[in-house]
Amino acid sequence: MVADWVRTLGEMPEQALPVVRLVKAMHAEDSVRSLLPTFLQSISGRLRENAYAEVLKHLANVHEAATAEARERAVNVILRYLTAVAEAGPGFATTVLKADGVKLVSASGAARAPQKLAFAHDSIHPEDRLDQRISRALEVLRAEQPDLPEPIEEVPDVSDQSAAGLVATLRGLFNPWRTTLSACEPIGALLCLLGAGAQSLSREFFSTWSPEEVLDWLEENDQTRGTLGRIRDRIRRREFRLLIVTEPCAVVCSILGNEFEARLADQPSTLLLPYHGYSIEAWQEDCHSVCRLRLRKLALDRGNYTEEVLLALLRETAGAVLAQALRAKVDVRPLFEKLSKATQLHVAVAQNMIVDQALAFLRQIGAQSHPNLKEALGLWDDARRQEAVEDVHKLISRRSADLRRQAREKIRGLLAGDPLVQAVVLGGVKRKLSEFQYAASSIPFELWQNADDAVAELLKLGIDPSEAAIRLGFVAIDAGDSLVFAHWGRLINEFAGTEGINCRDAGFDRDLEKMLVPAISDKSEISAQGETVLTGKFGLGFKSVFLVTDGPEVLSGSVDFAIRGGIYPVRLNETERTALEATLKMLAPDHWRRGTLIRLPAQTQSAGQVLSLFRRLASLLVVFSRRLKRLRLCSNEEQDVEVRWHPKRLELEGCIEFGALDHLEGGPRRALVLSLSIDNDRAQFLLGLGSDGFLPLPDDVPVFWVTAPTRDTPCYGFAVNGPFEPDVGRVQLAFQSEQNKQLASGLAVAVAVRLVTIWKLSCEDWQGFSEKLDLASGTTAHAFWESLWDMLGRRFADKCPKDDRSPLATLARRILWNSETDGLQCFYRSCPALPTGLWSLYRTLTRLPDLHHVAAGALDREQIFKTVSFWPGFQRRVSVGCICSNRQIASILGRLGVRLDKAESVHLANAVEWELGKDRRADPELAARLGQLITPEFLKKLQEGRPDERDEFAAYSGPIR
């Protein structure tokens, strides 16, 4: 210490510290050097204020100019002088430190004026707070916290407006943390310590714990309970006044008592910000205590705030509140360790629920044939009988409960650890899937539907789904030995949302049960409550995974499990969980904690076979999904494929969209989609688009979809999606479903209305319309609308004959042709978009009511009609747009059930008769016109034609004068 003193103060001016020369001389003389420690101690504390100030100035300069080693020596000397200053009293110390030019060492090592330094607190930036050792030496300057007695009265109720303001403020502070934390219980634990308002908010962040359970745990482990009473009572007797600091700086008190704006630390260890040197200020007001806390709002996007960092912040903040505001002595580390893993309780709860609910299923599949299961089921029956006896005789006994517990534990042990029992139960699950015609190819479609539902459900939790739907989407990976699927929608069993939203009533907390226990479904309940029923949330569809694997592995947020025996979840081991986490981190480094990943180790079919149809229909999946609009297909064997749906609106309402169909092999590259809104859902009618107009979809594309496809492929050339009611296995639409009939009727109206809108847009500006749809530059309006007729008229009549009475054909006809008031009939009655199927002047677009004639027989031939169409008599009798081809239009309309009752058939003979007139006299000019038609070639074709055409012409081609 003497050597440090000499090195540090040896160059100090003598007028400031006269003893310097003597000390240096004594230090240089071996004979007296040993006396220096005693001498220095004897003169310490005898300096005046100005002398201490000069010493501190000099020491600050030495510290600033010194090397790292020398700085440490300088701090040691500074500490000795500051200790002496502090021992002289706070007034003396304040005078010394206020002297001009005095500087102290900050936590960053820089020298700063005391007026710009706060006491050591790691919420303050190192440059704006004292070095920890110097802060301890000057503790005498810290304002004393009053030693308040324990309050005796509860805090008066605050106004609803104030409570709502507090809740909104705290919700805004902690809601952003949800994306980083696997479990939000630690947030709830901190909030339930901060008074009634914050305690009510805390319930939004609990999923398996509750405020009462947290307080119970704290009280059981509080060393002060015997003297200060229950922690919950102490909370009620304190008024917590909270201030949220959102800026990177905050006003604090310096060690000298003046206010200054301090920068905040980049990596604090607590959310609390000090003011007078204390994290929490407290004072007495009436008969209760007031505790003022300043909480910092972290900019999560700017710092390295990992889950571990955030958990530590919550733990340390809660510990400080307990110790400083509530005077409790509790080690909160074990509690927060449990809370951070709280969501794993979902698996344990599901295990119990599944054991109870699986009993009927085990009997249904004949599992009692296995001796161990037979014994367990027998125990359960004994428990039920004993319970009935106790109930009848009003007995107070635990025998039935004990028997039930024994049976439950027996079944649990068998499902979790007995491979033979697992095989028996899994076999039953597979047989059930086979009964409902599920196939391995169904798996990716079922998981896609579940993912789409999960993304849609984010809205119910108050979470914007756009990130999960568009940027992250859905991923299917063919890993060779396994299949992997991932999405970023609502996590499994996630029911608590923002703004106090709680979706327990919607069954969001029962996902695990619904995934694993057969025949659990909330659809009828939700429908009865007027809610939208999602496509297929975690029913038999999810169990289709067992068609390719015996042990699926799942990671969703912090919930992880593998499934044994088709119905029983067990926790993943560390290696398995880490592998799934690594995959999620690879797919979405910034959002992996919000991801759900399902891995299916393939055991019965290759991953490529399972994904083949899914890959084939991927381009339509993203069109028909409710929310998911990005699909990534990754494979070790094939090129990765990414499919998106980025439609453009054809009109403002968004009911008519068009966009690119990515990767639909052998099909159109674009699609036009007509939509119908249905509550919170929609139905869609999709038509393929080419450069010249409409094109049919490939023959292997199913017509009807319920987000995912049914299996029927009647080659109609279009696709329809909506909340149809499928059969259980989703092979086809449900037979005789009133819901499907009503939906088809609604779509028929929508198709008519949307087509009328398209027709109007095309008439207003054909050039702009065709450019918008990216049609070829030479495409005409006639060619465009003719392509629609070819698709929905000619092709549909060929592919859907009248005698086809299947539900699929019936619904398709209802959408398109069954009624004059909707569908294609309504459209063609309203708009001249129906091609006549004729030639020359008469090749035009018309409306159904305008058709008064049908070209039939020989007249329905191109060369004949072209000639006849220029005859004056024909033109006088038949207006353009009032006649159509029988073969091309009228006969097809008849097959579609549309009758042209007011249209008369016009044959070649009729045209000749009109031209000849009543006296059948032909002048030279008329004879020349007839001669152009009645040529040897014409007669030959007529001879080769149909008999009725020959007979009719013969009847009208008698003597001509």
Image (cartoon, rainbow, N blue to C red):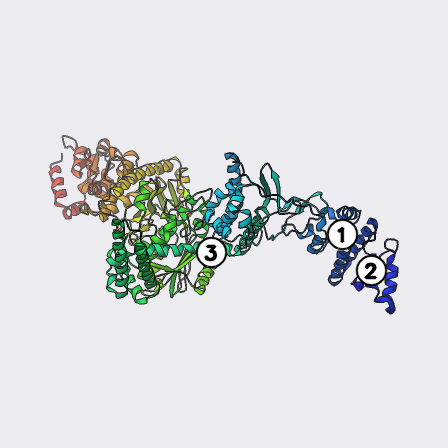
Foreground of the two, 192 or 849? 192
The image shows residue 948, relative to residue 479, as above or below, that is: above
Mark 3 burial class by Cα count in 10 Å: few <14, some 14-19, many 20+ = some
Q: Is residue 233 left or right of residue 743?
A: right
Tell me where residue 480 appears, x and y as whole percent: 38, 65
- Mark 1 residue type: Glu
Q: CA distance from mark 1 to mark 3?
A: 49 Å
Residue 309 versus residue 121: which sits nearer the camera? Answer: 121
Relative to 398, residue 482 above or below? below
Circle 1 sits on which residue? 87
The answer to whether any part of residue 445 appears in the image is: no
- What is the secondary structure assignment of the residue under circle 3? loop
Question: Which amino acid is tagged 2?
Answer: Leu
Q: Quadrant of residue 813?
A: top left
Q: Which residue is mark 2?
A: 40
Q: CA distance from mark 2 to mark 3?
A: 58 Å
Q: Position of residue 258 (x, y in %)?
A: 71, 43
Q: Residue at x 31, y 59 (%)?
A: 407
**Residue 627 location (% of width, % of height):** 40, 47
The residue under label 3 is 341
* Residue 328 against residue 748 in the figure, above or below: below
The residue nearer to you, when weighing 173 against 98, is: 98
| CB under 8 Å between discs 2 and 3 | no
Q: Residues within 10 Å of mark 1 (few under 14, many from 20)?
A: some
Amino acid marked by disc 3: Lys
Q: Is residue 111 left or right of residue 738?
A: right
